[in-house]
Image (cartoon, helix red, strand yellow):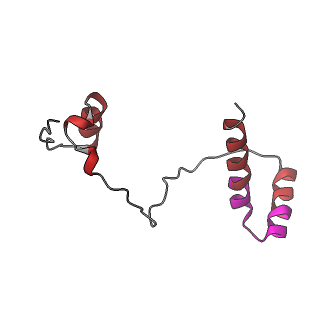
């Protein structure tokens, strides 16, 4: 296995382009890699705007109140559950 020297990158875009076109095993000895955990790593989030009927929002707030969670958090839970269900359907 030949380990080439990883170049210095001027930007993340340059690095992304480089790794998108190269086989990392030519630069990194993956047999020496170790699994790590990053407990404080938080996923990237993006704000979105969504229009919902007022009655639906009120119903979500009622459900959230019963579960003692913020209604927007409950919406994220509902969406995540449905996405997982749809992805695991096949």
Q: Is residue 71 magenta?
A: yes
Q: Which quadrant: the C terminus?
A: top right
Q: Residue at x 57, y 51 (%)?
A: 47
- Which residue is most to the top? 21
The picture places residue 22, in percent across and down from the top left corner, at 25, 30
The picture places residue 49, in percent across and down from the top left corner, at 64, 46
- Taking 42 as reference, is 31 left or right? left
Q: Which quadrant: the N terminus?
A: top left
- Give residue 8's quadrant in the image: top left
Report the front residue among 40 and 34: 34
Report the front residue among 81 and 57: 81
The picture places residue 19, in percent across and down from the top left corner, at 27, 35
Report the front residue among 52 and 73: 73
- Taking 20 as reference, is 79 left or right? right
Look at the image and give the residue range highlighted in magenta: 62-76
- Taking 28 as reference, is 54 left or right? right
- Give residue 58's quadrant in the image: bottom right
50 up-or-down from 66: above or below: above
């Amino acid at each position: 296995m030949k380990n080439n020297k990883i170049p210095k990158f001027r930007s993340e875009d340059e690095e992304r382009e480089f790794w998108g076109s190269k086989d990392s095993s030519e630069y990194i000895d993956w047999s020496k890699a170790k699994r790590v955990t990053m407990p404080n790593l938080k996923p990237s989030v993006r704000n979105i705007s969504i229009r919902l009927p007022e009655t639906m929002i009120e119903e979500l707030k009622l459900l959230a109140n019963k579960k003692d969670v913020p209604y927007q958090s409950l919406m994220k839970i509902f969406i995540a559950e449905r996405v997982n269900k749809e992805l695991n359907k096949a």
